[in-house]
Image (tube, helix red, strand yellow):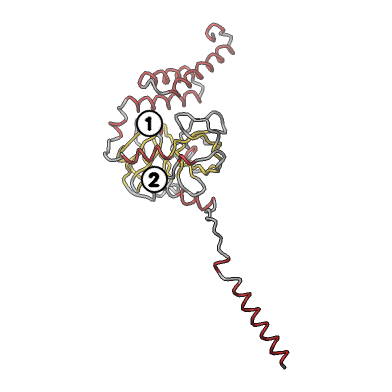
């Protein structure tokens, strides 16, 4: 009998000690929890918009995202061309008219638009902390269709202090957000790349400075009259003609862009490339003199 009582007592003690060993404070990890990639992209999806513009019968698509309840950030070249523009949600159910421009940075091809309406903005992180090899998520509307693009931060090589990324961002992605694994914006897709596998992003810290002085509103019509903006419009027009192999007309547009803004470095580069392609075409047709 005594042995039975002793055995029961030992079992009770062991049960108590075992239960203490599983208290909640011993099972909680001290490491921060990183949201899953699909959760990050889904949240950003609601704040990323397609920007639609048209001149005559031609429709063009770009990307943007909310940086305040009633403000959208995008590239200047997305909205520089004459004609009406509007922003549309990814599901197509909400359309926002553009009231005007509140701030812009011509050198970095960045503009903040005032929108007639509201949506949830994305938060901006410190882009100076970005590390080579860091995984990223880029979002935009290549061809007008929403797309999530995964990649990494590239080498330290930079243009205008832009962030170099190893990710394929097709035409139409310009102006879209680039997020880190915490779901915060570290850059804005600017669309220039060395090849099909690299592109660039304007650092989020550049956008922060722009938002700090984003107050007065200028109409799109008046804003587009500025030489800096007209230069962007001609540059984009020249790029489209280059892609359609109309090299002579592309060169003419790049010339106009340079005349309006001699500091547009990419216009010189693209003009030189167009002249090279035109020379190749002339040589292929046996016009050696014109090729030279």
Tag 2 secondary structure: strand
Q: How many labels does the image show?
A: 2
Tag 1 secondary structure: strand
First in sequence: mark 1 vs mark 2: 1
Quick check: 19 above or below 64? Answer: below
Measured from the top left, where is residue 170 in percent x and y? 52, 35
Q: Name the residue under label 1.
A: 55
Quick check: 167 above or below 230? Answer: below
Measured from the top left, where is residue 246 in percent x and y? 49, 20
Q: Nearer the viewer, mark 1 or mark 2?
A: 2
Q: Name the residue under label 2.
A: 66
Q: Quadrant of the N terminus?
A: bottom right
Q: Residues within 10 Å of mark 1 (few under 14, many from 20)?
A: few
Residue drawn at x 41%, y 18% is 255
Left or right placement of residue 39 versus residue 235 in this view: right
Alpha carbons under labels 1 and 2: distance apart: 25 Å
Splitting the image into 4 quarters, where does residue 61 fall? Answer: top left
Splitting the image into 4 quarters, where does residue 250 fall? Answer: top left
């Amino acid at each position: 009998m005594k042995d039975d009582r002793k055995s029961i007592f030992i079992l009770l003690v062991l049960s108590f000690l075992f239960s203490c060993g599983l208290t909640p404070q011993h099972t909680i990890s001290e490491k921060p929890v990183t949201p899953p990639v699909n959760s990050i992209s889904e949240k950003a999806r609601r704040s990323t918009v397609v920007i639609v513009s048209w001149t005559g019968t031609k429709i063009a698509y770009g990307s943007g995202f909310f940086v305040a309840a009633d403000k959208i950030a995008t590239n200047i070249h997305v909205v520089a061309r004459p004609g009406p523009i509007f922003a549309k949600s990814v599901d197509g159910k909400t359309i926002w008219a553009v009231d005007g421009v509140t701030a812009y940075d011509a050198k970095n091809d960045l503009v903040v638009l005032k929108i007639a309406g509201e949506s949830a903005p994305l938060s901006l992180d410190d882009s100076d902390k970005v590390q080579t090899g860091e995984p990223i998520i880029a979002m935009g509307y290549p061809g007008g269709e929403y797309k999530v693009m995964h990649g990494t931060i590239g080498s330290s090589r930079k243009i205008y202090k832009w962030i170099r990324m190893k990710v394929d961002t097709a035409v139409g992605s310009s102006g879209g957000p680039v997020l880190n694994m915490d779901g915060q914006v570290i850059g804005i897709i600017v669309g220039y790349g060395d090849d099909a596998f690299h592109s660039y992003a304007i650092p989020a810290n550049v956008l922060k400075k722009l938002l700090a002085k984003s107050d007065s509103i200028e109409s799109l019509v008046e804003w587009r009259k500025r030489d800096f903006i007209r230069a962007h419009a001609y540059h984009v027009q020249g790029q489209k003609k280059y892609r359609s192999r109309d090299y002579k007309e592309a060169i003419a547009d790049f010339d106009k862009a340079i005349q309006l803004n001699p500091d547009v470095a990419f216009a010189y580069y693209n003009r030189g490339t167009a002249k090279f392609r035109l020379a190749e075409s002339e040589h292929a047709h046996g016009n050696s003199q014109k090729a030279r």
